[in-house]
Image (tube, rainbow, N blue to C red):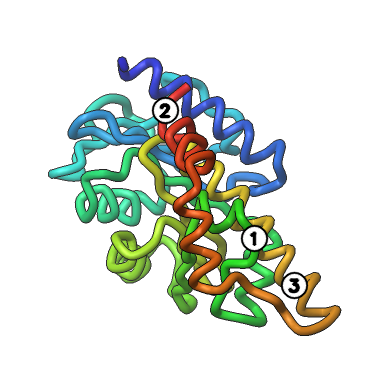
Amino acid sequence: MESLEIRNELCKYALKTVRDGLVVGPGGNISARFGDKMYLSPSGFAIEEIAPEQWVEVDIPTGEITDIGLRPSSEVLMHLFCYRKNPNIGAIVHTHPSNCIAFTLVATELPVMFPDQAALVGKTLYIPYVLPTTDLLAIAVADKVNEASSLLLGNHGLVTTGRNLREAYYRTQVVEESAKVYMIASAVGKLKVLTDEEYAEIASLESEDYRIKLLQQMK
């Protein structure tokens, strides 16, 4: 895997975030790790308009910008702290999905309700509102990043992690769908969530294990 491939993958998934309605305007930011470097969306750009050469290369240990003169996303500390905290993270997707934001306005615990959620995401944690772009938010997210691959940010959005962009992005899609299902079902009646035993059964399925392994491949 070369850095150019990483940059092209970032362009691919940036475009997906817009097409799937997960961000609007210059909102959201995504990154991918390549050795001791990360490539992060530049500040002030509509994410779908970023060219491969415009992803900002940042040294993870030092935080130094090591390639071009563009300014990295204002959430650069959040990405840096997460990569430093968990070396198994290969990509981070931070979006502002409408159903996820709406969910955080009325609830804090997103239960596991259906098989895709159980197999691809697992538990989702909630972080109460913290002022965006600050080191306080970066610390709050990094403190939870080893506990769950998806974090709902109160009144703000969603952060997902994965071994690669595909895995992190699919988790974003599933959590957004989960928030939507939760609100629809809660408006109708009492919620039926998966039990711990049902959750464990899904995790033990050979077919789900195969699907997860596919998601962990870059292409």
* Kind of residue at badge 2: Gln
Residue depth check, mark 3 versus mark 1: number of the one nearer the observer: 1
Residue 158 in the figure: left or right of residue 40: right
Please tell me which residue is depicted at 51% across the width and 66% down the height of the picture.
152
* Kind of residue at badge 3: Met
- The answer to the question of whether label 1 and label 2 lie on touching residues, with beta carbons closer than 8 A, is no
Structural distance between the alpha carbons of marks 1 and 2: 24 Å
Q: Nearer the viewer, residue 87 or 41?
A: 87
Residue 183's mark? 3
Please tell me how crowded label 2 is: few (under 14), some (14-19), or many (20+) other residues with Cα within 10 Å: few
Label 3 residue SS: helix
Structural distance between the alpha carbons of marks 3 and 1: 14 Å
> Nearer the N terminus, badge 1 or badge 2?
1
Q: Nearer the viewer, residue 2 or 210?
A: 210
Residue 114's mark? 1
Structural distance between the alpha carbons of marks 3 and 2: 32 Å
Please tell me which residue is depicted at 60% across the width and 38% down the height of the picture.
46
Quarter-wise, where is residue 56 in the image?
top left
Quarter-wise, where is residue 170 in the image?
top right
Residue 59 in the figure: left or right of residue 174: left
Quarter holding the N terminus is top left
- Residue 71 in view of the camera: no
Residue 58 in the figure: left or right of residue 204: left
Where is 82 relative to 10, above or below? Answer: below
Residue depth check, mark 3 versus mark 2: number of the one nearer the observer: 2
Where is 181 relative to 209, above or below? Answer: below
> Nearer the N terminus, badge 3 or badge 2?
3
Q: Horizontal and vertical percent for residue 198? A: 55, 66
Q: Which residue is mark 2?
A: 217
Residue 82's mark? none
